[in-house]
Image (tube, rainbow, N blue to C red):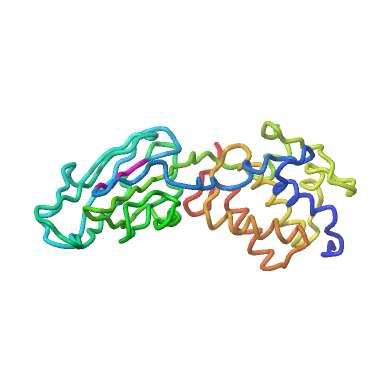
Amino acid sequence: MLTRSHLSWLAPLALAAAAACSTDALLAPNRVAAPTAPAANVATSTPGTMQLCVRGFAGLSTFSVGYTPGGSSDLYALPQGANVAVLAGNCLTVFTATLTEALLYDPPVTVHLAQLSKPAGSVFDYTLATPFTEQAPCVPDTDPCGDDVKGTSASANVQLNAYHGSVVTYFNAALGCTATLGYWKNHDWPEGSDPDAAFFSSGKTWLEILGTPPKGSADVILAHQYVAAALNVAEGAYMPPLVKTVFDAAAAYFAGGAGGDLTGWASTLDAYNNGLALSGPPHCE
């Protein structure tokens, strides 16, 4: 049975996935991770307005827009109505806060957004929202605004008033599809991947790892599912956050980190590879 002391040939699985510049890496690092957020929002907030932006997968997304007034409701206008549509790559002003009288303090209004639909073949990934500040008009990632707030829900609640605006950017990712480890044993691998790539001094390749009989070893079973999951992402499949957490934990374990529920991790990755993960891509037909 394979034990932790025999994992030297498995370590390159994690190292190849994590290496930033190595020419020996099987997969480019951005090919084995869920999409990452940019450093800041795509637009700068304008006092008194709320901009809704969409980035990522091409196509039209629709949203519901509502609000909870902070002061008198007649101080605020929602000219676009309750539902709006935004094409990827664009921004739309969905709310305007106006003053009908001079106020030293304008109580903030809360705008409620919910993504109703997204382009076919895509999945909601995350949002970035400009934090509300009482100090000055907010410029992303500068004082006193602070960093954009990343959200993992398709619903967002954002504050603004006549003096301070906000921007919310929705990111959609390609959903793609997944294949099992059996598929990757017998089919071409994604571009840039070499099934015959050697793993340091192990004398084994990625393909040989897939062909190694588990013989009841939780390590080998997990390695099989890990490799298949990495190849699916390299092929363009979306990896939902919960699966990505397990994927990263497995990578850290193979690199010599702390262990955990290896059987449970393997089951999670197996479900992903079979198209059964919650909010994950379907199995490739």
Number of numbered tags placed on the structure image: 0
Residue 213's x, y, as percent? 81, 52
Q: Nearer the viewer, residue 88 or 259?
A: 88
Q: Is residue 262 left or right of residue 4?
A: left
Instruction: Give, as a single range, the part of the protein colored magenta.
Output: 49-53
Residue 234's x, y, as percent? 63, 39
Q: Per the image, is 20 magenta?
A: no
Q: Nearer the viewer, residue 99 or 1?
A: 99
Q: Main secondary structure of the magenta part?
A: strand
107 vs 201: above or below: below
Residue at screen point 17% across, 47% down: 78
Q: Is residue 242 left or right of residue 180?
A: left
Residue at screen point 62% across, 42% down: 30
Residue at screen point 72% across, 51% down: 224
161 vs 81: above or below: below
Residue 162's x, y, as percent? 21, 53
Q: Nearer the viewer, residue 167 or 145?
A: 145
Residue 29's x, y, as percent? 66, 43
The quarter of the image holding the C terminus is top right
The quarter of the image holding the N terminus is bottom right
Query: Which image quadrant is residue 52 in?
Result: top left
243 vs 56: above or below: below
